[in-house]
Amino acid sequence: MLQAQRNKYLETTIQTASPAQLLIMLYDGAIRFSKMSIEALNQRQMEEANRNLLKVQDIIREFMVTLDQTSPVSEGLMRLYEYFLQRLMEANMKKEVEPIQEVLGYLVDLKETWIQAAKHASQVASHS
């Protein structure tokens, strides 16, 4: 019963979220799955690490396909996302934590940047 209520809550949250909120939620997921893959590798749970790394890669691919190509920062972000995928694939093949930690640091920084951008955009919109 609780799981059904939680799923309904999450569904409603996603359906009513702004594009900026959805982006931040995706970053949260990528960060969470990155941490889970690091933990799994540290515990030598290779299958779990692989599963979580693939989830992070799926989220990054989602960033890539939804990237606004008209934005001045899109080219730089696309290169950064491609680099993330390369590092995550390397981590998965070599079963190394370091590349995941590197990507995780960037994901945390980018999430904070998007949070600040969303706050700024909402302040500008409320003053219009």
Image: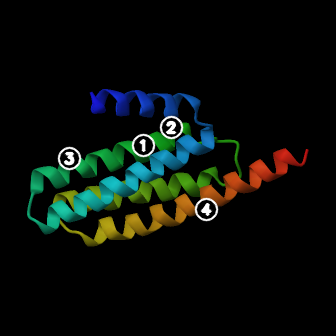
According to the picture, the residue beneath numbered tag 1 turns out to be 61
Q: Quadrant of the C terminus?
A: top right
Indicate whether 121 appears above or below 43. above
Instruction: Name the spot of residue 47 as percent of width and height, x first.
Output: 11, 50
Which kind of residue does numbered mark 3 sit on?
Arg
Which kind of residue does numbered mark 1 sit on?
Arg
According to the picture, the residue beneath numbered tag 2 turns out to be 65
Which element type, helix, strand or loop, lies under badge 4?
Answer: helix
Q: Earlier in the sequence, mark 2 or mark 3?
A: 3
Residue at coordinates 61% horizontally, 62% vertically from top-left?
113
Contact between labelled residues 4 and 2, with CB atoms less than 8 Å apart: no
Task: Give residue 96's quadrant in the image.
Answer: bottom left
Q: Which mark is residue 113?
A: 4
Q: Earlier in the sequence, mark 4 or mark 1?
A: 1
Left or right: residue 53 versus residue 95 is: right
Indicate whether 116 appears above or below 27. below
